[in-house]
Amino acid sequence: MPIEEYERLRRWRLILGSQAAAALGIGGSTEDQSRFGDDDRKIDQALELLYDAERSGSLDGSKPYIPRWLGDIRTYFPTPAVRILQQDAIKFLNLRQLLLEPEVLTTIEVDLQLVTTLLSLKSALPERTRETARSVVRKLVEELERRLAHRMEQAVRGSLRHMNRSMRPRPTEIDWDRTIRANLKHYQREQRTLIPERLIGHQRRQRSSALRDIVLCVDQSGSMAASVVYASIFGAVLASLRAVSTRMIVFDTAVVDLSKHLQDPVELLFGAQLGGGTDINQALHYCQQIITRPRETVLLLITDLYEGGNAQELLKCAAALVGGGVQLICLLALSDQGTPAFNSELAGQIAALDIPAFSCTPELFPELMAAALQRRDLNLWAAQQGITTVRAAQS
């Protein structure tokens, strides 16, 4: 058999399983064992353990072999494929229960879905597994921080410098370098002098007062799990910046203020309780109580708007916040997963209050925060980024 033909049949044999061995003439008892070698058999066994077990809906009988299975798939498959296999095992089989075993956690490939699954199980984690679970969560958090933290700091610091620049500075506050560069077009050749049309400087600010207050109000229902992870990381980055004051509120049918854990996003995540119902109205009222400088506050409500509480009271509270000067933004998702499912009717009513409502990827979130701090038109900003915003509901 030509090599190309054998390779094609070999791939189909691994996809279809042992039932196809006789029809394909590959991997059966009478087949040339030297060609369908040990690696092929281990790949075949790894796929059979998952996809043949799927028919019975459990891996319980194979529990002693799970750490070995996890090691095999990492050996024989590239990382993207490993993550898909792990996700299928969590989704279709009883691997959720096996995640409570520390020996399983030490061999699994860490990704966002694994971490959100662990966080949803944290109340069931036995004592011997908790530290291992924390180390797994910390590994993902550190990876995401390396990817996102610097951009977040740069974007926010840049926007705050822009905010703090005064166009009417006192003589001792003039930034002559920026002033000269901004007015070069007004240079008078005859007089050999420059006549500044506008002066640029820096306002003095009190050290005890942050320039802006930021409140992250995050829905921790199961569908928003990825958003909770990303919001925790961004909240920790924002909390490290002295020029802003940051609060982190999570909610389901209860409201929990996790601001004291912002220095450690892992502790913050373990303080969240993924799953449960949703009472957005109660969460917004709590935020209304803790906001002391409405005109200096950016409130990010991160939720899919599937309200289990009083939707009309929610809209009244949102309108009151905006009317008081709060810059309220509704993020329907903070994740990489594309267009989320959300309550389109309530989203349209939110948008009718001049509250921007759209989803945002983690990569764009730093620029979103910079635009919000500068009080730019966020619907225009979103359009420039190719983001579809929710249209206001017709009254």
Image (cartoon, rainbow, N blue to C red):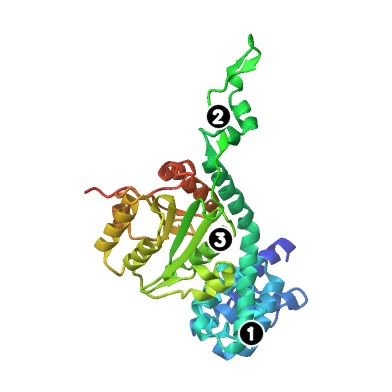
Mark 3 and mark 1 residues within 8 Å of each other at the beta carbon: no
Sequence order check: which comes first, mark 3 or mark 1? 1
Task: Specify the amino acid type for callout 3.
Answer: Ala
* Residue of label 3: 239
Task: Specify the amino acid type for callout 1.
Answer: Pro
Residue farthest toward the right in the current orientation of the protein: 34
Callout 1 environment at 10 Å: few (<14), some (14 to 19), or many (20+)? some
Q: Work out how far the residue at label 3 is from the one at label 1, CA to CA, in angstroms.
A: 32 Å
- Regarding residue 245, the answer to whether it shows in the image is yes
Q: Report whether 28 appears left or right of 333.
A: right
**Closer to the camera, 280 or 294?**
294
- Regarding residue 13, the answer to whether it shows in the image is no
Residue 117 appears at what percent x and percent y?
Answer: 52, 75
Residue 74 appears at what percent x and percent y?
Answer: 68, 73
Task: Specify the amino acid type for callout 2.
Answer: Leu
Residue 12 appears at what percent x and percent y?
Answer: 61, 68
Mark 3, mark 2: which one is toward the viewer?
Answer: 2
Name the secondary structure under disc 1.
helix
Identify the residue shown where x is 60% and y is 73%: 137
